[in-house]
Image: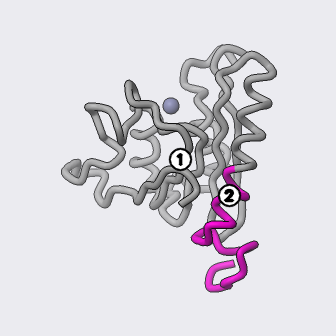
Amino acid sequence: MAGNDSADDDDTHPASHERFMRRCIAMARAAGARGDTPVGALIVRDGRPIAGGGEQTPTGLDITAHAEIVAIRRASRALGSVDLRACTLYTTAEPCFMCSHAIRDARIWRVVMGARTPNVGCVSSAYPILSAADITPWAPRPQSSSGMS
Ligand SMILES: [Zn+2]
């Protein structure tokens, strides 16, 4: 709950980051076990998980079914809105171009990511659209951090 400083309820607390990232890792492992790319993502608001999912591209026959997109779709349905500005997205991998577009359009305010994907990742690649400050329709850019720190 917002305003509660307990590690269980505060998504700004490092212990919460670790707990939510562990859930992403479990979803990533499940995705890998069924033949999908092992990526998992979770949307959290006010310290509470809203929705999550693992990659479903080949098994779902859907090129857009990256873990972050799956989580964003489910969170929008759960909240009844495509405006996710109060939410944090956790993901096991640095978001790609497609997912970064969705993250910015949904106005997700913070992204906590695991592994860097320097070729197609939108923070560390040559096309950092997740962190770019000069894309005015998407301002402000989300906070982003990698790992558990
Ligand atoms: Zn993606």
Which residue carries the number 1 mark?
Answer: 113
Which residue carries the number 2 mark?
Answer: 18
Residue 14 at what x, y percent from top left?
62, 67
The residues bearing labels 1 and 2 have C-alpha atoms spaced at a distance of 11 Å
Q: Amino acid at mark 2?
A: Glu
Question: The magenta stretch spans which residues?
Answer: 1-21
Q: Residue at x 71, y 65 (%)?
A: 48
Residue 4 at what x, y percent from top left?
68, 84
Helix, strand or loop at mark 2: helix
Q: 10 Å neighbourhood of mark 2: few (<14), some, or many (≥20)?
A: some
Q: Look at the numbered disc 2 and say if its residue's Cβ is closer than 8 Å to ligand 1.
A: no
Residue 29 at what x, y percent from top left?
76, 31
Q: Is residue 87 above or below residue 39?
A: below
Judge left or right: residue 77 versus residue 134: right
Q: 10 Å neighbourhood of mark 1: few (<14), some, or many (≥20)?
A: many
Q: Quadrant of residue 70?
A: top right
Judge left or right: residue 43 versus residue 137: right
Q: Residue at x 60, y 40 (%)?
A: 92
**Towards the viewer: 139 or 121:** 121
Residue 98 appears anywhere in the view: no
Q: Is residue 27 above or below residue 87?
A: above
Helix, strand or loop at mark 1: strand
Judge left or right: residue 96 versus residue 26: left
